[in-house]
Image (tube, rainbow, N blue to C red):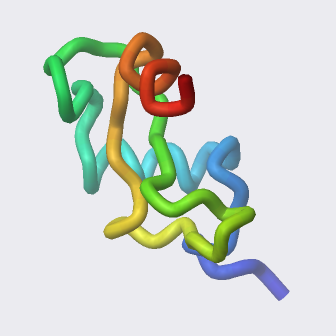
């Protein structure tokens, strides 16, 4: 049985394509590309891969968020 797209790992190509379509390819903070898709609530803290829990961030801002 194939997993639902929202249950797949963020590295899965189909999931990444979906994120690009939904969230775009520019950092939500500065507008730069390329981006990584950041979980607002980490998976380890009960977050999920649903669209409302993910935002695109450039590598710099992604590192700052985790810094």
Above or below residue 65? Residue 61 is above
Question: Residue 44, how many percent across, how many down?
Answer: 73, 63
Q: Going 54% across and 66% down the picture, which residue do you hit?
A: 49
The quarter of the picture where the C terminus appears is: top right
The residue sitting at 26% across, 48% down in the picture is 23
- Counting from the top left corner in percent of width and height, residue 16 is at 51, 45
- The image quadrant that residue 48 belongs to is bottom right
Q: Quadrant of residue 26?
A: top left
Residue 55 or 22: which is nearer the viewer?
A: 55
- In this rendering, is residue 18 above or below 64? below
The residue at 15%/20% (across/down) is 31
Q: Is residue 12 left or right of residue 6?
A: right
Above or below: residue 54 compared with residue 46? above
Q: Position of residue 24 (x, y in %)?
A: 24, 39
- With respect to residue 35, does 20 lie above or below? below
From the viewer's perspective, tell me whether residue 29 is left or right of residue 59: left
Question: Residue visible at 57% across and 71% down?
Answer: 47
Residue 54 on image: x %, y %: 40, 55
């Amino acid at each position: 049985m194939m997993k639902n797209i929202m249950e797949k790992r963020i590295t899965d190509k189909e999931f990444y394509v979906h994120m690009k379509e939904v969230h775009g390819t520019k950092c939500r903070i500065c507008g730069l590309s390329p981006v990584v898709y950041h979980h607002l609530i980490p998976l380890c803290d009960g977050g999920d891969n649903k669209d409302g829990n993910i935002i695109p961030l450039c590598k710099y801002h992604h590192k700052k968020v985790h810094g």
